[in-house]
Image (cartoon, rainbow, N blue to C red):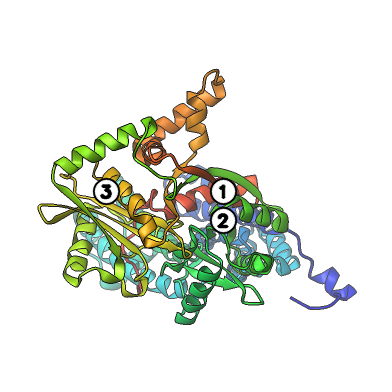
Amino acid sequence: MTTGSPTTEQSSTRPTSPRAPRVLGNLTYLVGAVDLLTGLFHGWRVRTQWLAELLPGALSDAAAAATIVSGVFLIVLGHSLKRRKVRAWRAAVALLAMSTVLHVVKTEPASAVLSLIGLALLVRYRSSFRALGDPKTRWRSVGAFAGLLAFSLVAGSFVVFMARDDIVGGWPSTTDLLTELVYGFVGVTGPLQFTSDRAGDVVFSVLLGLGLMTLLTPVYLALRPPEPRPEMSDDDERRLRELIARHPDSLGYFNLRRDKDVVWSPSGKAAIAYRVVSGVMLASGDPVGDPEAWPGAIKAFLERAEEHAWTPVVLACSERAGRAWVRDTGFSALELGDEAVVDTTAFTLEGRPMRNVRQMVRRVERAGYVVEVTRASEVDEGVRRRVLVDAEAWRSSDTERGFSMALGRLLEREDGDCVFVAARQDGVVRAFLQFVPWGSDGMSLDVMRRDRDADPGVNELMIAAVLQAAQGLGVKQVSLNFAAFRSGLEERERLGAGPIARLWGWVLHVASRWLQIESLYRFNAKFQPQWRSRFLIYPTGRDLPRAALAALEAEAFLTWPKLGRLGAAR
């Protein structure tokens, strides 16, 4: 960007518009569809002769093939243009210029004018496209293209081989076969002739499908929302640890996850840890550090999001931090639920409210369970290795869940201040917990694992034991599991709850079959905690669905099928 006041000439020739990327992305979709259809009509000229006759001019095979390729790439580029990607802008300019020339050659004036309009608008609003891409994605797309092209050539040859009895003149030469495959990949009839229309149609359709797959997949990989590898350096981690110790927060320690990156305030007194998920720059918890330096960290966070055209979102921040975000950005806030925090100085198993927990604890103790509470640095190496194996075996899902309220590792040397809780039966560990530090006098639940064959109530036993032992560890407050949408579940049960509250509660009840919303709330509520609200911060209502999907993906409640490891270098 140019500093200072722009000149009159710059203002007239390099305008910017917040709406231009979205409008031009949609226009690119339209031009791409026109290119694709006009090219395919030529490819199907024998099968749809009446449509081909409506198109002006005589189309050559080469021009039709180029038009189809241009259309496919423009359609894929549309989304990246909406996200202001400068690399997508460069590619779109080249393709629209080519599309304009092709339509002129084919005497299609209306299509040529449409492409030319798109080209002119892209050039006029070029300053609106400044977002950087991810250079690693480019090489991945090259590898994917090479692999898919090789696969398509082999698969296409096999399809032609299966129709060999219907080829006029018998099996073709290598040159004719390759020409047939390449033309077929872009929807153009090649040199081979078939005695059966059915055989010709099958070969044509399969080759076109293989070609579109070969073209679309690499372009998608090159232009999809980048998800750069986290690059938190040792120095970043050291500085974060210092800030976390000086300005404790119940979720602060989770910012030391190794799959997060970090952006610092200009003063270095505050930082925001984040991960990029499907084009969403997802911060977790409160900014780390001095609250007076939060505005500088928030500004740096937004600048990095703007630089890459990522959507900035904050997951699970406190009310204090939420107010700072909303004040400094104008973003919106949505209450996600409540964090359960127990005051260990007042905790007791006695009394009627704790009767259910007390009964479960005593029943499990009678079954021979014994609980050990210790610092992670004091855990025996043999126990540590066994716990890592058990943690994998006892996990309830195929992926490790957690992002904003999980550390993502167990009993590691640098986390020696973590608290490890193990429940043993006959000397064998049947369940365990790990808590991370929360300042000098608090800790937050990180990991909860149990053997599927362990007695019900073993988790309650471990929580009760650690709360009772907390004061001996110098711990006065313990953060337990997060209860998503707690207020909605409670409102449903209140006397006189309205139909909307009951409907929302019912939706949460149904969703709990997959996301454990209600079960986590009821487990937390057993220990009579204080409830502290946590919020989702997002730019606009239009961004909310995308932000929610990114949050679910980061927490591993939502996993997408993988397209293998095509071209990946991970």
Direction from residue 270 to residue 150 in the image, left or right:
left
Residue in front for this viewpoint, 299 or 239: 239
Give the Cα distance between marks 3 and 1: 26 Å
Q: Which mark is residue 314?
A: 2
Residue at 51% across / 56% down in the picture?
Answer: 39
Q: Which residue is mark 1?
A: 535
Q: Which residue is mark 3?
A: 396
Residue in front for this viewpoint, 155 or 379: 379
Q: Position of residue 208 (x, y in %)?
A: 38, 56
Task: Describe the element under mark 1 as helix, strand or loop.
Answer: strand
Residue at 85% across / 69% down in the picture?
Answer: 12
Residue type beneath disc 2: Val
For residue 487, above or below residue 216? above
Q: Position of residue 4 (x, y in %)?
A: 84, 78
Within 10 Å of disc 3 (Cα), the crowding (few <14, some 14-19, many 20+) is few
Location of residue 81 (image quadrant): bottom right
Q: Earlier in the sequence, mark 3 or mark 1?
A: 3
Residue at 17% across / 48% down in the picture?
Answer: 369
Task: Describe the element under mark 3 as helix, strand or loop.
Answer: loop
Give the farthest residue toward the right: 8
Task: Describe the element under mark 2 as helix, strand or loop.
Answer: strand
Within 10 Å of disc 1 (Cα), the crowding (few <14, some 14-19, many 20+) is many
